[in-house]
Amino acid sequence: MKDKITKIKIFLSILAVIGFGTGCNDNQNQLDEDNNDLGVSLVHTTKPIDQSVANRAKEKMIAKEEISDVKAVNTEKELFAAIKVDNFDRFRLKKIEKSIKSDLEKMNPNHEIIVSSDKKMMWELEQLEQKLQKGNTDKKSLKKRFK
């Protein structure tokens, strides 16, 4: 009787190890595929509102591997950027924000730089980028929305 119970325990242990090994392996491949599809949408607008500063900032920020998405909008004197950080990098969120802000301040010394990882800010900037892309906003409304 003890011999049967021991064989059953060994069989179940081997089955559990195989199950855990194959389950974790499949998810890693999926995460690698998701990161390869990342892209930054550059905002091209008409002459009155130039977004070249925001576009350069997006390219600089998305190059960092811990950042998965970036939204940015600029006025004449301000640059507002929202970042999305991968799951485990959220433990170092303040350090990442500080690093990005210092990099952007070096790139654009005459702009006031604001960097946020807030999801609502990401959503608001995405809407603002879409309005700029369509040409539905002017400088005055952009500054008002920025505040």
Image (spheres, rainbow, N blue to C red):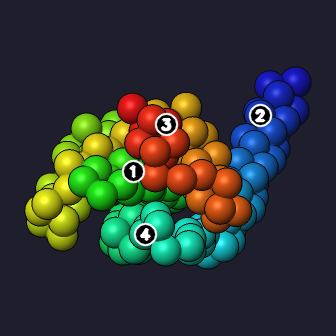
Image height of 107 relative to 146, above or below = below
Q: Give left or right: position of 7 versus 94.
A: right
The x and y percentages for residue 74 are: 38, 56
Quote the CA–CA distance across marks 2 and 3. Answer: 64 Å
Please tell me how crowded label 3 is: few (under 14), some (14-19), or many (20+) other residues with Cα within 10 Å. Answer: few
Pointer 2 residue: 9
Please tell me how crowded label 4 is: few (under 14), some (14-19), or many (20+) other residues with Cα within 10 Å. Answer: some
Element carrying mark 2? helix
Q: Nearer the viewer, mark 2 or mark 3?
A: 3
- Amino acid type, residue under disc 3 in the picture: Arg
Rendering quarter of residue 5: top right
- Amino acid type, residue under disc 1 in the picture: Ala
Numbered label attached to residue 137: none
Numbered label attached to residue 145: 3
The answer to whether marks 1 and 3 mark residues whose Cβ atoms lie closer than 8 Å is: no
Q: Nearer the viewer, mark 1 or mark 4?
A: 4
Pointer 4 residue: 50
Q: Nearer the viewer, residue 83 or 30?
A: 83
Q: Nearer the viewer, mark 1 or mark 2?
A: 1
Pointer 1 residue: 81
Element carrying mark 1? strand
Quote the CA–CA distance across marks 1 and 2. Answer: 55 Å
- Amino acid type, residue under disc 4 in the picture: Asp
Q: Nearer the viewer, residue 49 or 44?
A: 49
Quote the CA–CA distance across marks 1 and 4. Answer: 16 Å
**Circle nearer the N terminus (3, 4):** 4
Please tell me how crowded label 1 is: few (under 14), some (14-19), or many (20+) other residues with Cα within 10 Å. Answer: many
The answer to whether marks 1 and 2 mark residues whose Cβ atoms lie closer than 8 Å is: no
Please tell me how crowded label 2 is: few (under 14), some (14-19), or many (20+) other residues with Cα within 10 Å. Answer: few
The quarter of the picture where the C terminus appears is: top left
